Image (tube, grey):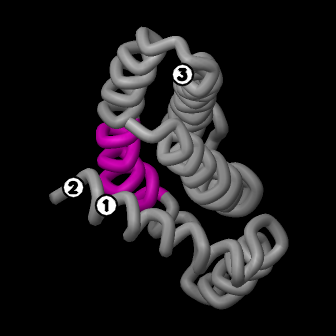
Amino acid sequence: MDPDHLEKVLDFIRVFADRCHHGKEEGIIFPMMEEYGVPRAGPIGVMLIEHELGRGYVRRLAEAVERYGAGDIEALDIFTENAKEYVELLKQHIDKENNILYRIAETHIPKDEDENLLERFEKLEYEKIGPERHEELLHILEKLSAIYLK
Ligand SMILES: [Fe+2]
């Protein structure tokens, strides 16, 4: 496996999944849910804990990529193991968000905040990634998918 591809996967996870997606949740939607009476202790707290667990996996993935890049072949097993666990964490995390958390958000946040939310999401995306980087990340994902998900 090309170490450069692993670097790219890591970059995608860090920027797209963590900085952008989790950034929108932690910086915008969770605080707004709290503003409208959803307590932090409960589903929001669980999501925050899971984001931290995810960051733990990403740190271990980064260490493995670095070691692999330096010629340590065994680090690829560490990468694979952590990547699989990270995928499992994210699958159930996304499921909880879609089926529990966002249903709670919909019942608490009034509909007339939708536009405000959308604007804030776009602003965050623009500031944290930028349009060119966004396109570049999607392009990398397509390229790697064509190689590895045949
Ligand atoms: Fe999340």
Question: Where is mark 1, residue-wise?
Answer: 145
Question: Where is mark 2, residue-wise?
Answer: 149
- Element under disc 1: helix
Whether residue 29 sits left or right of residue 82 in the image: it is right
For the C terminus, the quadrant is bottom left
Residue at the extreme front: 71
Categorize mark 3 by other alpha carbons within 10 Å: few (<14), some (14-19), many (20+). Answer: many
Position in image of residue 139 (x %, y %): 49, 74
Position in image of residue 97 (x %, y %): 41, 50
Type of amino acid at the residue the image marks with label 1: Ser
Position in image of residue 78 (x %, y %): 43, 14
Residue at image position (52%, 37%) is 3
**48 over 64 or under it: above or below:** below
Mark 3 or mark 1, whichever is nearer to me? 3
Mark 3 or mark 2, whichever is nearer to me? 3
The magenta span reads: 90-104
Question: Where is mark 3, residue-wise?
Answer: 68
Dot 3 or dot 1: first in sequence order is 3
Residue at image position (46%, 66%) is 107
Image quadrant in which you'd find residue 25: bottom right
**44 over 66 or under it: above or below:** below
Measure the C-alpha gap from mark 3 to mark 2: 21 Å
Measure the C-alpha gap from mark 3 to mark 1: 21 Å
Dot 3 or dot 2: first in sequence order is 3
